[in-house]
Image (cartoon, coloured by chain):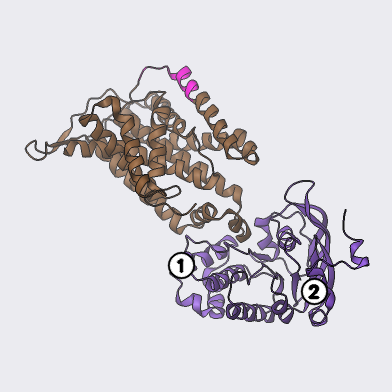
Amino acid sequence: MLQILADGLIIGSVISLGAIGLSLTLSIVRFSNFSHGELLGWGSYVALSALAVFTATRESLAAPLGPFSFGWGMLGALVVSMGVTALLALALDHVLFRRLRSQGSITLVIASFGAALAMRNLLMYWYGGVPQYYTQNLQISIPLIPRSIGGGLRITADQMLVLVLTLATVTALHLFLRHSTLGRSMRATAINPALARVTGIDPERVLRATWVIGGMLAAVAGVFAGITVQLRPTMGVDLLLPLFAAVILGGIGSVWGAVLGGFIVGLAESASVSIVGAEYRAAAAFVVLILILLVRPTGLFGEKH
Amino acid sequence: MTAPPAPDTPLALQVDALEAAYEPGLPIVRGASLTVQRGEIVAILGPNGAGKSTLVKAVAGLVPVTGGRSLLFGQDITRVPAHRMVFQGLAFVPQTENVFVNLSIAENLELAAAVVRADRRERLDPVYAMFPDLARQRRLPAGQLSGGQRQMLAVARALITRPRLLVLDEPSAGLSPKLVGLVFDKLREVRDSGVTVLLVEQNVKAALALADKAAVLVEGRERLFAPAAELLDDERVAALYLGRHTGRQAQGVQP
């Protein structure tokens, strides 16, 4: 029982971080970006390549840090991947979405499907379809709660770090959106783009910031998925529907909504694995989604849109 | 950052044969001209669909201009994008949805100051002094304000940028007569503080009482442009509202 909760929170971390970026794109760039999942996939593989480069140059970077399965090289690779994935998101906007923006959101949605296919297949082409791992080191999970209480709870140090870093990232983003001028400009543009322009906010600058933040969060989510599960070229498409479910659940445009939505979807998935079996895992998110939307059509934290 | 220094011209705004269209080939503003002297309040009047809002939106850079030009204190601002207008000294207050409802009063004003890279305190304090109601409730989300308070916040937000010309699209829309009086009093105060004001109005009587000059717009073009005091008793104003064209005016109508 407790284990289901812990597993759900870890899957939920990945979904939350991805969902925030998707939600920001939806409310600021104003279209459903179906290639957002691929940014997670790319983020995880860029980190794999960066890690390989780091460990090839200095072997000590691969040495595990304390209780974790990875060394400094992994953290460096995460930072590199955040930068590269942000640039990738900007590049996608520059060569594709920007040019189609005047055509309306349906065109953008279809274009994002195409982008997703291309991105996924490039990953498949370069890295192959076989699942990979950042490290071959085995990790022993730490029993936090003995079996006698609620079935017990075991968690690895990696998983704990993922949870802590997710909360830290979300808090940092929250402070940025709440207190920085650029963050407030993003919120202003999301709620009222015309008034934002009149106020003197450059819409292009806000769009660029949105892609950069979405890309960086996607990279973090992708790397976390790689650390806690494995790297697969289909990671993006597999996560896409849970991401959308989390965004809609939480309410479009709400950061905390996306986080809560992500954790709820994560918990629903992990509960369904043990209750009805792993085959129905993907369906779990949608059952929860439908139930919540029946009660609150704007999502949990939905603002009027 | 502040607006460039005003050149030595008494003309705050000069609109020359301006044409504007949301869609190519469908002009809403069709060659409108008017001038606003420094320190004046000028009202744009006219029946529904005359293109009043589109005219001020075109001046503010929100609607594509397809012909003519507009000069702000002698500087051509016809092609200046909407988000650069505050840096030119023009602040625009939209008719509706003119505050950020997800931000507090203070955040609305702070954002406006931060965008023009001005010191918060230095910009907010005088505006709070002018709008004590807003100062009292500064932590309140703008979405919870009443219509009149919202309009005050919208004006306050525009003043934060220290404009030389304040352009308002129907500031009385949806307000009770009493509140319209309060908003208009505020606009007089704004004018007296040295800001030139251009506004669109539906409420002819109130607008003519407020403004120094008024233009009556019909089918995208100004038909009358005269001191407000003269227009108060001018029968042509009512005739234009009712769509009765005199021979001279009818010539201007495109088939």
Q: Which numbered dot is residue B144?
A: 1
Q: Which chain is purple?
A: B
Magenta span of residues? A120-131
Dot 2 surroundings within 10 Å: few (below 14), some, or many (20 or more)?
some
A236 up-or-down from B231: above or below: above
Relative horizontal placement of residue B181, taking residue B133 as reference (left or right): right
Q: What residue is shown at x 77% (from left), y 57% (from top)?
A: B78
Question: Disc 2 and disc 1: Cα gap in Å?
Answer: 38 Å
Q: Amino acid at mark 1?
A: Gln
Relative horizontal placement of residue A277, taking residue A150 as reference (left or right): right
A299 up-or-down from A127: above or below: below
- Give coordinates of residue A75: x percent, y percent: 36, 36
* Front residue (pair A203, B216): B216
Q: What residue is shown at x 49% (from left), y 68% (from top)?
A: B105
Q: Quadrant of the N terminus of chain B?
A: bottom right
Same chain for the residues under marks 2 and 1 in the image = yes
